[in-house]
Image (spheres, rainbow, N blue to C red):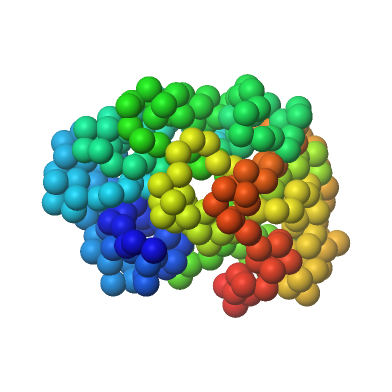
Amino acid sequence: MTSKRILITGANGLLGQSLLFLGQDRHVLLATGRGPARGNHFGFPYAELDSTKAEDYERVFAAFKPDVVVHSAAMTQVDDCEQDQEACNLLNVEATKLCAEACARHGIHLIFLSTDFIFDGKNGPYGEEAEPAPLSVYGWSKLRAEEAVKASGARYAIARTVLVIGYVPGLSRSNIILWARQALGRGERIRVVHDQVRSPTWSVDLAEGCLRIAELGALGIYNISGPDTMSILDLVRRVADHAGLDASLIDPVSSESLGQAAKRPPITGLDISKARRDLGFSPHSFSEVLNRIPIFEN
């Protein structure tokens, strides 16, 4: 396997940290993010890069000369996107457009991270050719970003994923497994939706899928998610059972009862057969993932 020079935007996040961890002995990586470095960059260099500024791409690309860019920087909190559409458009659509155009100018292979929220959740699990129909500002922003990538002239791959879970030391934002363990570990009652179905994705598996796309020079759309599809209620109950916590503290509720700003697609999940076939992608089962995310963080 030929080592590649891979630049990661959003490297302070869970996926970025997982890419750096997996890439240690495989590639030359550059971690980038807005503002100073956070987290563990596993000995790789770090550069400040504001994804909304074209001149930052030019400066960092000229210095590092990447073969591949993994663009994971995004505004991903769905309700925040609904309430601040201008920021969502800037960070998810305009920033992606700038990144893709810079990749096109420099002949760089772009891997863009997208989401199951581009679908309405009526007909999941979804294949790569399914027709998008977003329900939220966040979903629309990621679909428009996909369109910007396709129109940019860059050599691109779009990696769509679902409900990313995992743990790295110093993680700045929680995810559903950590949240459930922490709340139940404190004896708190939690409300969990019973009417949303997802394919939870370990960040390490998602990172591996992205690295395989980079290594193979793969182009087009790939679904990169976990292999198991379940309701969020079932997911949280399995987290409780695995950690020996009191599942009776979990109150099943409807999505509507939460009064969230943004609508969520009810049943998504992704068909990963193309990634299995073309990339050799083989994600861990949800049970295996639970065994690998440290319980001591409760």
Residue 156 visible in the shown view? yes
Instruction: Please tell me which residue is depicted at 61% across the width and 62% down the height of the picture.
Output: 178
Q: Does residue 38 sit above or below 119 in this rendering? A: below
Residue farthest toward the bottom in the current orientation of the protein: 296
Relative to 15, is 69 on the left or the right?
left
In the rendered image, the quadrant that contains the C terminus is: bottom right
Instruction: Please tell me which residue is depicted at 53% across the width and 65% down the height of the picture.
Output: 167
Tell me residue 17's x, y (percent). Answer: 42, 61
Tell me residue 63's x, y (percent). Answer: 14, 51
Instruction: Please tell me which residue is depicted at 55% across the width and 52% down the height of the picture.
Output: 279
53, 38: nearer the viewer? 53
Location of residue 79 by image quarter: top right
Q: Does residue 185 sit above or below 101 in this rendering? A: below
Q: How many marks?
A: 0
Tell me residue 116's x, y (percent). Answer: 61, 37
33, 297: nearer the viewer? 33
Tell me residue 137's x, y (percent). Answer: 53, 26
Residue 181 visible in the shown view? no
Relative to 188, is 29 on the left or the right?
left
Location of residue 247 by image quarter: bottom right
Instruction: Please tell me which residue is depicted at 39% across the width and 63% down the height of the picture.
Output: 1
Residue farthest toward the right in the current orientation of the protein: 248
Relative to 161, is 85 on the left or the right?
left
